[in-house]
Amino acid sequence: MSADVRLTVNGDPVVLPVDGGPLLFVLRNRLGLKATRFGCGLEQCGACVVWIDGEARFSCTLPPEALDGAHVVTAEGLSADPVGRALLEAFEAEQAGQCGYCLTGILMSAFTLLRKDPRPGRPAIVAALDRHLCRCGAHGGILRAVERAAARLAGRDA
Ligand code: FES
Ligand code: FES
């Protein structure tokens, strides 16, 4: 049996040797996808969240070998998807964030939410982002950006 792990990352097939590192390190160090961030390494901050087969998951503790055959989307892949593009445009329009360190993880949780529910209310957005820490206190702009993206996708804005 092969020890390789086969994933699709941002639409591209990749084959990875099993080397014991978490998915976050594979994304950043082996695949050069630096948008996904290391914060705590303990599932406590949300900086490392990526989309995996429809769910927002912490990549800092996730062994790639548990994901054979999975589809993964990182922030680098958002522009290839209409929901992702709406989020990127909305975050820019709202100037959401300050230092930006937390934002890629937050974008991936927002992407997961809007892929499941294109018309979430504020409580659903807050719940979806509850696991994310933002040390800059940019929460207001971030919430407005997700609402703006949802409105755009629902055709409620110009
Ligand atoms: S780095 Fe994964 S939750 Fe903080
Ligand atoms: S914008 Fe700086 S941590 Fe969130």
Image (spheres, helix red, strand yellow):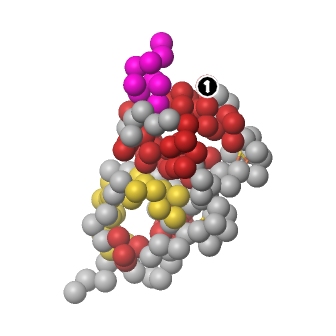
Q: Is residue 108 visible?
A: yes
Left or right: residue 133 compared with residue 71: right
| Rendered position, 4 above or below 75 | below
Q: Secondary structure at mark 1?
A: helix
Q: In this rendered view, identify the residue nearer to me: 41 or 55.
A: 55
Q: In this rendered view, identify the residue nearer to me: 29 or 115.
A: 115
| Rendered position, 136 above or below 155 | below
Residue at left offset 40%, top offset 20%: 155
Residue 42: % across, % down = 62, 72
Residue 125: % across, % down = 53, 42
Residue type highlighted by circle 1: Ala
Q: Which residue matches tag 1?
A: 93
Q: Which residues are magenta?
A: 150-158
Q: Residue furthest left?
A: 1
Question: Is residue 71 located in the magenta-colored stretch of the structure?
Answer: no
| Rendered position, 81 above or below 55 | above
| Rendered position, 133 above or below 113 | below
Residue at left offset 47%, top offset 82%: 20
